[in-house]
Image (tube, helix red, strand yellow):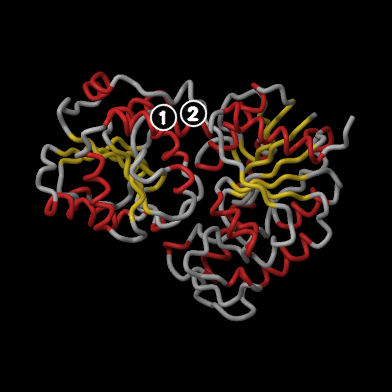
Amino acid sequence: MKVTLINTSDAGGGAPAACMRLLKALAHNEVDVHLLAQNKYTTEARVEAVADDALGELKAKADFYYERLPFILLHEKDATVRFAFSAANAGTNISGNHLIEDADLLHLHWTNSGYLSIKNIKQLLALNKPVIWTLHDMWAFTGGCHYAGDCDHFLKECGNCPILKDASPNDISHKGWLRKNDLYLNAGNLVFVTCSNWLAGVARTSSLLKRFRIEAIPNPIDTSFYTPQNKAKARAKFGIAADAKVILFGAANIMHTRKGIAYLVEALQLLKSNYPENRNVEVVIFGKNKGFDVGRLPFNVQQLGIISNEQKLTEIYSLADVFVLPSLEDNLPNMVMEALSCGTPVVAFNTGGLPDLVDHLQNGYLAEYRSAEDMAKGIDFVLSSTEANKLSSAARNKVVSNFSNEIVAAKYKALYQSLLPSS
């Protein structure tokens, strides 16, 4: 069984990380698997890049700008939605690549930012090979947005898109819906996989995907690597007091509206005013920060910046007492899975795929959606718990029992085999 995964890159975000973890999990479980990316940033031998020379890199950049600039100049309502919508008008025909031709099965992941246009995806479906498409967001069943927020226009034919300044019944979201509807008309060998039960449920209600087979299979994680580290040593390494109560927050871009930093600010202010017993609190933040003033937080803050070293990440998760994720929309966040695997309880809003990861009052706390007050209550629940070891063990066991490489790889292998002719 030869499987080719397809993703825009092999590093640089949640979808690349999840795709690379699946690549390694499948390879370790005797699947002949490769990843065909537009850009390659790692040294992984099983990854090949379409942009593998100067000309290819130039084309990749040109496709990215051809994809982005018209949206920025003509359609975006403001800069906060700059990367929230992908028209997928530009891309590369990869149907003749040897990894595509040799594969028994194609496995799409996240292909935006100028890698594959809707036309290019149609070219892959025309090969009549079985195709699995793992959804890391909502893009495959909307007119172009990656997360719909409060909008339900994907239940019909999109149009009047709330993130467009020129919204109308026939705007680019409606045109995108029509192009995807055409894409799916004769896609008989296509099966969709979502990383969370939440996204599977939403996809099944969508006008574009409701007739397709949709399975929910989580992302895998190497639980032998993401494992609890020595808390005292980790704190000493990063200059954090051994007796501090440490709240951890991280995001690829902490200023992204969807990541809910405003709710974190309010929750921590409420934690300080309503739960005064939580003294000696320190906040640790990692990820890209362009513009957030940490002085808005009522506790001592240490910023670690962008962390690319995964071993260092395990230490950062392990030094914390609680990982807080105030995201307003999220599928199956890698950071939450990583934190839990390192034995760190998580507090998050009860939304998206978070209930797949966080068991309320067992390995963390699911706060009422958009309630900073309840989030503060959840943080206090973890910090004040007299059973910290029990919370930590439950966090670790949740991941080991549900999201390990072996468990997830077995689920994908079974799905692959169900789509291939029996030998």
Closest to the observer: 386 or 33?
386
Q: Position of residue 381 (x, y in %)?
A: 24, 44
Which of the 4 image quarters holds residue 1? Answer: top right
Q: Amino acid at mark 1?
A: Arg
Q: Label 2: few (<14), some or many (≥20) within 10 Å?
A: many
The circle on residue 351 is: none
Q: How many marks?
A: 2
Which of the 4 image quarters holds residue 233? Answer: top left
Residue 52 visible? The answer is no
The circle on residue 400 is: 2
State the SS at label 2.
helix
Q: Label 1: few (<14), some or many (≥20) within 10 Å?
A: many
Q: Is residue 36 left or right of residue 312?
A: right
Residue pictured at 73% horizontal, 53% vertical: 213
Residue pictured at 77% horizontal, 50% vertical: 190
Mark 1 and mark 2 residues within 8 Å of each other at the beta carbon? yes
Q: Amino acid at mark 2?
A: Val
The circle on residue 396 is: 1
Answer above or below: position of 345 versus 254.
above
Answer above or below: position of 8 versus 172.
above
Closest to the observer: 8 or 19?
19
State the SS at label 1.
helix
Closest to the observer: 12 or 392?
392
Answer above or below: position of 281 versus 115.
above
Residue 133 visible? The answer is yes
Q: Position of residue 251 (x, y in %)?
A: 39, 44
Q: Among all residues in the image, which is located at the extreme bottom? A: 169
